[in-house]
C-alpha cells in the first residue's frame, strides 16, 4: 500500500478511454484522485482513427498525468514545501 500512495494522494494515475475495450476507471466515472480520461481520437494518425487500448503515451492526457505523478512523487525539501515542477504548456 505504501508504494501506491504518497501522503494522502495516490502515487499513480489511471488513464482510460470509453473506446478501450480493456480499459475502465478504477474509482469511478466522476472526478477523483486516480482516474483520468484520455482522448478517444488519435490525432497523430495519418487518417482518422479511434484510439483503443494502445497508444496512451501519444495522448496529451498521458503527458499531463505523467507531470501530475512526478509532482506527487517529488520529495519535499527541508522546509516541507514541494519543489517546483516544470509543467508543459497547453497544446496549441
Image (cartoon, helix red, strand yellow):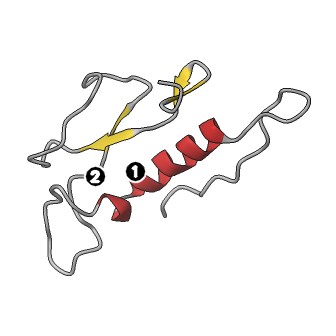
Q: Residues within 10 Å of mark 2 (few under 14, many from 20)?
A: many
Q: Is residue 69 left or right of residue 14?
A: right
| Residue 64 locus on image (x, y percent) | 49, 49
Above or below: residue 51 compared with residue 48: above
Q: Which residue is mark 2?
A: 39
- Of the pair 83 and 41, the residue shown nearer to us: 83
Q: Which residue is mark 1?
A: 61
Q: Is residue 90 left or right of residue 36?
A: right
| Residue 34 locus on image (x, y percent) | 40, 30
Say if mark 2 contacts mark 1, CB within 8 Å.
yes
At 53% across and 26% down in the image, what residue appears?
2
Q: Secondary structure at mark 1?
A: helix
Rendering quarter of residue 15: top left
At 78% across and 33% down in the image, what residue appears?
76
| Residue 18 locus on image (x, y percent) | 15, 42
Q: Is residue 18 left or right of residue 9?
A: left
Q: Is residue 35 left or right of residue 33?
A: left
Above or below: residue 89 compared with residue 14: below
* Pointer 2 or 1: first along the chain: 2
Cα separation, mark 2 vs mark 1, equals 7 Å
| Residue 56 locus on image (x, y percent) | 31, 58
At 18% across and 59% down in the image, what residue appears?
51
- Of the pair 12 and 18, the residue shown nearer to us: 12
Amino acid at each position: 500500500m505504501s508504494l501506491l500512495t504518497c501522503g494522502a494522494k495516490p502515487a499513480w494515475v489511471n488513464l482510460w478511454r470509453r473506446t478501450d475495450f480493456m480499459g475502465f476507471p478504477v474509482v469511478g466515472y466522476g472526478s477523483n484522485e486516480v482516474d483520468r480520461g484520455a482522448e478517444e481520437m488519435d490525432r497523430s494518425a495519418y487518417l482518422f482513427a479511434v484510439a483503443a487500448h494502445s497508444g496512451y503515451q501519444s495522448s496529451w492526457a498521458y503527458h499531463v498525468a505523467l507531470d501530475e505523478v512526478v509532482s506527487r512523487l517529488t520529495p519535499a525539501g527541508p522546509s516541507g514545501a514541494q519543489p517546483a515542477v516544470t509543467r508543459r504548456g497547453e497544446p496549441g
